[in-house]
């Protein structure tokens, strides 16, 4: 499959939007994990904003960062949301409630616990009726989401916004499923070149003996291997820099996803 990249969004610890993150990804500035900064948004009604948890805010912020450099009508864009898990804090609270005497689960917590909650809030915020897909594939969730987005873009011949997001669970869930840092990334992909296109990505999935592409910066490499969305970092580095690169992402059962990135 071949897709064109029109814009990128990035939000995480020490990665405060795509323009500010580009020199960090390419080695022009050191990566310093810091406070997570998510710009406030009034796209959601006040009642909905009060109900949203950090995963929803992270996914929306990464997606909106990509849309900030796009002229496409956001309510027409199909979306693929991918994450290795749901809202861990909500799941923790539900488990606590079920372990108690009353076993009462808040309806708000319940509807925030489902895996497509960010997609639902996105459709409300953007007033979008475009199709969306929400998927999960453990540590390979970004690669799975990328394949899904590329398949939609290729078969439907329409642009698609891929949003990947992952953040740590609270204890005791963190002890059995540790995730490093908080990271959200978004890619606006199109089937054909436009005036907004700046990179071409050829995508191929299959068996392969090559190891996954690593990050040169030690701290970024820890984020890559410790956070499922961090698997996107080598691709983001290529999109931030010279763009002529061939990358490998780990995938299911020893298979790989190979990405050939070139400028356009």
Image (cartoon, rainbow, N blue to C red):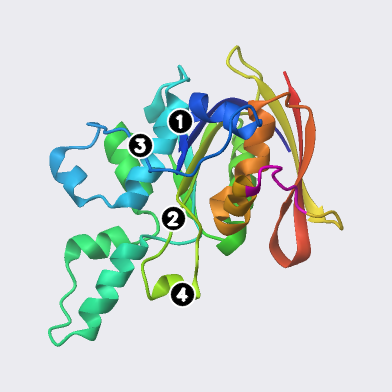
Residue behind mark 1: 17
The number of numbered badges drawn on the structure is 4
Residues packed near mark 4 inside 10 Å, few (<14), some (14 to 19) or many (20 plus): few
From where the camera sits, is residue 257 visible? yes
Residue behind mark 2: 167
Q: Percent x, y for residue 126?
A: 32, 32
Q: Is residue 217 magenta?
A: yes
Label 4, secondary structure: give it. Answer: helix
Question: Who comes first in sequence, dot 3 or dot 2?
Answer: 3
Relative depth, front residue between 126 and 165 = 165
Residue at image x 60%, y 11%?
Answer: 195
Residues packed near mark 1 inside 10 Å, few (<14), some (14 to 19) or many (20 plus): many
Q: Kindly identify which numbered label has been placed on residue 129.
A: 3
Q: Residue furthest top?
A: 195
Question: Who comes first in sequence, dot 2 or dot 4?
Answer: 2
Give the residues drawn in magenta, as a range.
Answer: 212-218
């Amino acid at each position: 499959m071949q897709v064109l990249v029109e814009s990128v969004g990035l939000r995480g610890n020490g990665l405060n939007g795509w323009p500010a993150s580009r020199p960090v990804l390419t080695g022009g500035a050191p990566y310093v994990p810091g406070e997570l900064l998510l710009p406030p948004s009034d796209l959601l009604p006040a009642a909905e904003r009060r109900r949203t948890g950090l995963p929803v805010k992270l996914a929306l912020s990464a997606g909106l960062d990509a849309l900030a450099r796009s002229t496409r009508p956001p309510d027409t864009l199909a979306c693929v949301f991918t994450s290795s898990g749901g809202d861990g804090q909500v799941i923790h609270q539900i488990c606590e409630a079920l372990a108690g005497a009353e076993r009462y689960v808040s309806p708000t917590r319940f509807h925030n616990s489902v895996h497509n909650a960010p997609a639902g809030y996105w459709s409300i915020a953007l007033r979008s009726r475009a199709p969306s897909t929400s998927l999960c594939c453990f540590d390979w969730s970004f690669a799975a989401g990328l394949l899904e987005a590329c398949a939609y873009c290729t078969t439907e011949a329409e642009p698609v916004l891929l949003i990947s997001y992952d953040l740590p669970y609270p204890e005791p869930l963190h002890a059995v499923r540790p995730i490093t840092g908080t990271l959200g990334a978004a890619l606006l992909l199109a089937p054909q070149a436009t005036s907004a296109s700046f990179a071409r990505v050829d995508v191929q999935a299959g068996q392969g003996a090559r190891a996954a592409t690593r990050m040169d910066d030690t701290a970024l490499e820890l984020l890559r291997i410790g956070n499922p969305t961090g698997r996107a970092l080598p691709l983001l580095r290529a999109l931030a820099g010279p763009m002529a690169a061939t990358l490998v992402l780990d995938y299911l059962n020893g298979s790989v996803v190979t990405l050939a990135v070139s400028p356009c």
